[in-house]
Amino acid sequence: MMFSLVDIGLNLAHDSFDHDRDRVVSEAVTAGVRHMVITGSSLESTRAAIAIARASPQLFRATAGIHPHHAREFADSEVQELRSLLLAPEVGAAGECGLDYFRDYSPHEDQERVFRLQLQLAVETGKPVFLHQRDGHDAFVGILRDYLPRLAGGVAHCFTGGERELRECLELGLSIGITGWICDERRGQHLRDLVRQIPLDRLMLETDAPYLLPRDLSPRPPHRRNEPKFLPHILATVAGCRGEPPTVVAAATTANALRFFGFEP
Ligand SMILES: [Zn+2]
């Protein structure tokens, strides 16, 4: 069966794709992934994501942002550059930005400062936000609430939280991005039940490639690298958990993503 899908979170600028990026993209397109959003997680990866998107604007959008892991290195002198990157026509959202208290690579103070700064830039530039959050839900929601009324929307990318977190994200008006985490029979079990509670008009799909290779792929690829061509597998899992036809989930998630990231209709 053929779908037209959007991978809303793909780290295509990652160096693991340097030797075969074009092949990875063409195999994804062949598999039905007709649009991809390339995640920017630092100034450097954002510049690279925009360059890739600029070469094929019908296929790609980029995000422009600083991942919480990199918050400690982000200097106030770099705000102007981030603002101008955000204004590039290829950029569909601000981020990824948010809080990661799981890995804690940056002090919380830096993470919160750089998160607020990016929410403010998103408000100023009119871009929606691509949000990352792990183990910091309450602080995340507390900060987000200050900006939401002025934001052009947000998606909680790679949502892996519990029921209360999901309910609060939905109440805030956020869309929810689901990755291959849901294909993990151990740590993804709770998501299989929760995914039914996401309204179809708030759901989007993503691989987060090269990370988060779905655990139940068969046959398993010889390398550990995830690729956007595996998005239909995530679609099948999500549709199965929801008890809906894959065609219905594909059409809705694609329409949501095209609108959210500003692809031409
Ligand atoms: Zn993330």
Image (spheres, helix red, strand yellow):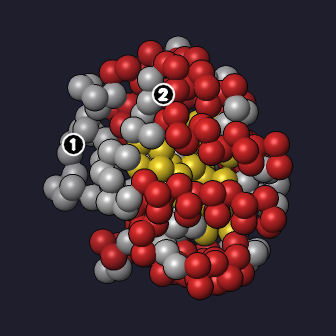
State how many labels appear. 2
In the visual, does 58 lie left or right of 149? Answer: left
Instruction: Give the numbered dot on residue 238.
Output: 2
Which residue is pictured at 82% across the width and 43% down the height? 149
Residue annotated with mark 1: 219
Say which amino acid is labelled 2. Val
Give the class, few, some or many, for how many residues have Cα within 10 Å of label 1's Cα (few <14, many ≥20).
few
Locate the C terminus and report the quarter of the image it occupies.
Answer: bottom right
Q: Can residue 220 be seen at all in this image of the molecule?
A: yes
| Residue 31 place in picture, x, y as percent | 48, 51
Check contact, mark 1 vs mark 2: CB within 8 A: no
Say which amino acid is labelled 1. Pro
Please name whichever residue, 199 or 126, is drawn nearer the observer in this view of the structure: 126
Observer-side mark, 1 or 2, equals: 2
Which residue is pictured at 78% across the width and 59% down the height? 123
Please name whichever residue, 149 or 153, is drawn nearer the observer in this view of the structure: 149
Determine the CA span between mark 1 and mark 2: 19 Å
